[in-house]
Amino acid sequence: MNFSLVTSIYLSAYYGMEELRSMYFCIFLIVYLTIITENVLLIRVVYCEKSLHQPMCVLLCNLAVNELVGSTALLPATLINILSHTHQISVSFCQTQVFVLHTYAITEFTILAVMSYDRYVAICHPLSYHVIMSQRIVKLIVFMWLYPMLALSVVFVFTLQLPYCGQTIEKLYCLNYLLVQLACTNTFIVNIIGLLSAALYTAPQLIMIFYSYSHILKICIMSFSKSKFKALRTCIPHLLAVINYATGCFFELAQGRLDNRHMSYHTKLFLSLYFLIFPPLLNALIYGLGTQIIRPCLCLYHILINRKKNM
């Protein structure tokens, strides 16, 4: 095929939804509306409740915003493609989706790393926590949004320059390595750059998370006081969020690198969508129900909303 004629990409994974199109549409619509409701509610509660205007909750709001961005880059397009009979998207839309989804993935991990640093300062330096974080919170927020976009742009510019011969991606959405596979030219250098960049994107965050929690555990074990272990409990929602996201990334990497021809359609669908759907769907619940500060505020907010409706 002449690559100059390739203007659209066929997403072949939608073929398995043909018979139950209405059911899949309803499921994804409910999931998307639930993600929006949970994360917007969480942001609104933190914004309206002055007692929650503290570094941890500010970082949590940034996490919620990023999850709204990631789910919006995926689910509206998924809903449209489910109803479509061609399951085709333009090359430019595919490239845009690649950039947004990869930025979401790196930003999510970066925010989780910054949140681990917040827990480290809160537990290991409790007396100077507010001073340290109030001085650094703005810089940290700028970093965790700007760094992923700039870092990805350096690599993504190589993908944009590739000519495409292939036209089929066996997924519901576009990813960078799948788009690179459609190129007409030799992509060895691009693949090497992609692998190196993936290591550079994740190494600093992993170091920060392991460094923070190694010191937190060390402090808690050495002091062996109820107050320290009570403080350690505040890390549980964050650890659950990290495990949830890491699980999704593992599923995506495993599916992309292992032979999945013997997997059922629904298994491949679950593995490919986990890191894009379950973190946005579960993190708001993990923090909203698991954090002692936010849980009562959410309950109070629901009570006030119900009172306004009844008046």
Image (spheres, rainbow, N blue to C red):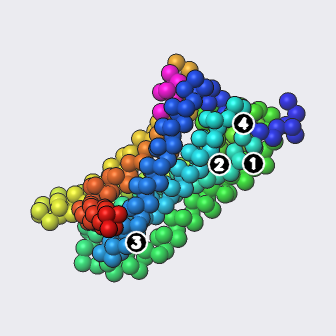
Q: CA distance from mark 4 to mark 3?
A: 40 Å
For marks 2 and 3 on the same chain, the one whose residue lies earlier in the sequence = 3
Which residue is tagged 4? 88
The residue that appears at 51% across and 55% down in the rendered structure is: 68
**For mark 2, what is the residue?**
97
> What is the crowding at mark 2: few (fewer than 14 residues within 10 Å), some, or many (at least 20)?
many
Callout in the foreground (4, 1): 4
Disc 1 from disc 2: Cα separation: 9 Å
Residue 114: within the magenta?
no
- 32 and 56: which one is in front? 32
SS assignment at label 3: helix
Which label number is shown at residue 81? none
Secondary element under disc 4, as helix, strand or loop, is strand
Q: Residues within 10 Å of mark 4 (few under 14, many from 20)?
A: some
Residue occupying image coordinates x 47% and y 54%: 36
Which residue sits at x=72%, y=40%? 89
Element type at mark 2: helix
Residue type indicated by callout 1: Ser
Residue 16 seen in the figure: no
The quarter of the rendered structure image containing the C terminus is bottom left
Name the N-terminal-most of marks 4 and 3.
3
Could you tell me which residue is drawn at 57 percent across and 59 percent down?
A: 148
The segment highlighted magenta reads 263-270
Q: Looking at the picture, does residue 191 appear above or below residue 67?
A: above
Where does residue 157 sit, x and y in percent of width and height? Answer: 73, 54
Q: Is residue 283 left or right of residue 297?
A: right
Residue position for label 3: 47
Disc 4 residue type? Answer: Gln
Q: CA distance from mark 2 to mark 3?
A: 30 Å
